[in-house]
Image: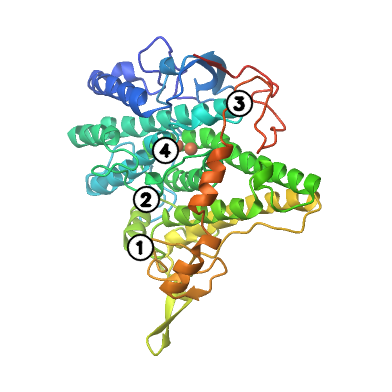
Amino acid sequence: MSVTSPADYTEKIPNNVSLNEDRRLQRALESWQPDFLDWWQTMGPSLPTQDVYLRTAVNVGREGWAHFAHVPMKDYRWGIFLAERDPDRRVGFGQHIGEPAWQKVPGEYRADLLRLIVIQGDTEPASVEQQRNLGATAPSLYDLRNLFQVNVEEGRHLWAMVYLLQAHFGREGREEAAELLHRNSGSADAPRILGAFNEETPDWLSFYMFTYFTDRDGKYQLGTLKESAFDPLSRTCEFMLKEEAHHMMVGTTGVDRVVERTAQVMIENDTDDVAALGAIPLPVIQKYLNFHYSVSLDLFGGETSTNVANYYTAGLKGRWMEGRRKDDHRLTDDSIMVDSLLEAGHGEQSIGQVEVAALTGLNTDLRREYISDCASGVNRWNKILADAGLPQRLKLPHVAFNRKVGAFSGIDATPDGEKLTADEWQRRRSQWLPTTVDKTHVRSLMRPVYERGKIAAWIAPPRNGINGKPFDYDYVHLA
Ligand SMILES: [Fe+2]
Ligand SMILES: [Fe+2]
């Protein structure tokens, strides 16, 4: 039997958490809502629109969890939805394995759970801020609509985290909810918590790379929180993952379409040098990939972490696909190989691996799952190149390349994992990371195309539209 009920969209805050039965929580959320709308107006999408063809979450059932309609973005109904509750759910790992899942926050884990929710929550509005001006240069109405869809859903993910804070963490939770709107991406005095969320997303190639690599980090983090013994967190993240699938699609097919168009222009003109022909050269695509992949790897933290080991043992945060792992789900006797700098004698260091306790290596375990997922995208982009008859290939750089966090943060390395001196790095980095010239060229291609069915020259049209609509559908009505 379902314990959840369909959302009532006549309420101020659509929800399936029986908000009307909790006056105190309802008031806390209603007093946060105007601040959220204020933030959306000043930090959200800057392009004025009448309405956008958007998906809105309305329920959590297996069939029909969302509906599609043209809606003015400022009237978008950001709601609170948790996946259906399994009354028999048990803790799946750690020292509490087999005990009933928690409906309330245990006092001993309160500070750690608060921290995990705040860090996840901080990423959601950050990406909206990073993408705020992209509407001015969208390559098509279809892409513009997808940008806004991602934006409103990241806004809803913020609501999801704020609900947990306000429902389960009292005054501290309310203070953290306010802070989530106070910090801003790239701000000098109050930046977002994680590095990649303070980088700019100034052009659409960056947007597709961000949704492919950085949003995908989000998918993996949500996957670990979905395993949490704290059931409301688990159910919240499970529902968010449904929405993330669309964000992944935007990134994957976005890069597909850039690669496809570049390949076409290369073949038609029999040249690799497509910059002057209005397309993005493959080496520039590779540099953008190198950048976004390496800053996203940093989001997984250090190769080893005792905090993360403690989170696992406590049952707060599991592994990706915990239920499918064939082990004891406690990991107290297991080990794992993790990346490390090795002493090579004479004060020299080399790039290698060491064996550590499986619990302390959990960041590496998650990052490994993420990397193999990233590799699947590179394979499909290379298939596009191969099908076009081109010999060039894209690739993921080595884990030691361009790192600011973890074992390799103190060294410089090539995308092939060859260690460099600081001087060599400075001399050669422009071969591997986007230069001012590259970025300026990419930005010069970013001219808006707002006519139905038309597309910018640097990208191929999508194979499919949204929700069965054609590519030339009127996805957005501009103001
Ligand atoms: Fe999100
Ligand atoms: Fe996302």
- Whether residue 147 is visible here, answered yes or no, is no
Please indicate whether residue 163 sits to the left or right of residue 330 in the image.
left
Q: Amino acid at mark 1?
A: Ser
Q: Is residue 442 visible?
A: yes
Q: Amino acid at mark 4?
A: Gln
Position of 405 with respect to 182 (left or right) is right
Residue 249 placement (x, y as % from top left): 60, 38
- Residue at 46% of width from left, 58% of height from top? 329
Q: Can you identify the residue that label 2 sits on? A: 195
| Residue found at x 25% / y 42% | 190
| Residues at marks 4 and 3, CA–CA distance in whole angstroms | 21 Å
Q: CA distance from mark 2 to mark 1?
A: 18 Å
Query: Mark 2 touching mark 1, by CB under 8 A?
Result: no
Q: Residues within 10 Å of mark 4 (few under 14, many from 20)?
A: many
How far is the residue under mark 1 from the one under mark 3?
47 Å
Mark 2 and mark 4: Cα distance apart in space:
12 Å
Against 174, residue 284 (above or below) is below
Q: Which mark is residue 449?
A: 3
| Mark 2 or mark 1, whichever is nearer to me | 2
The amino acid pointed to by label 3 is: Val
In the picture, the disc for residue 305 is 1
Q: Nearer the viewer, mark 4 or mark 1?
A: 4
Give residue 41's position: percent from left, percent from top: 35, 22
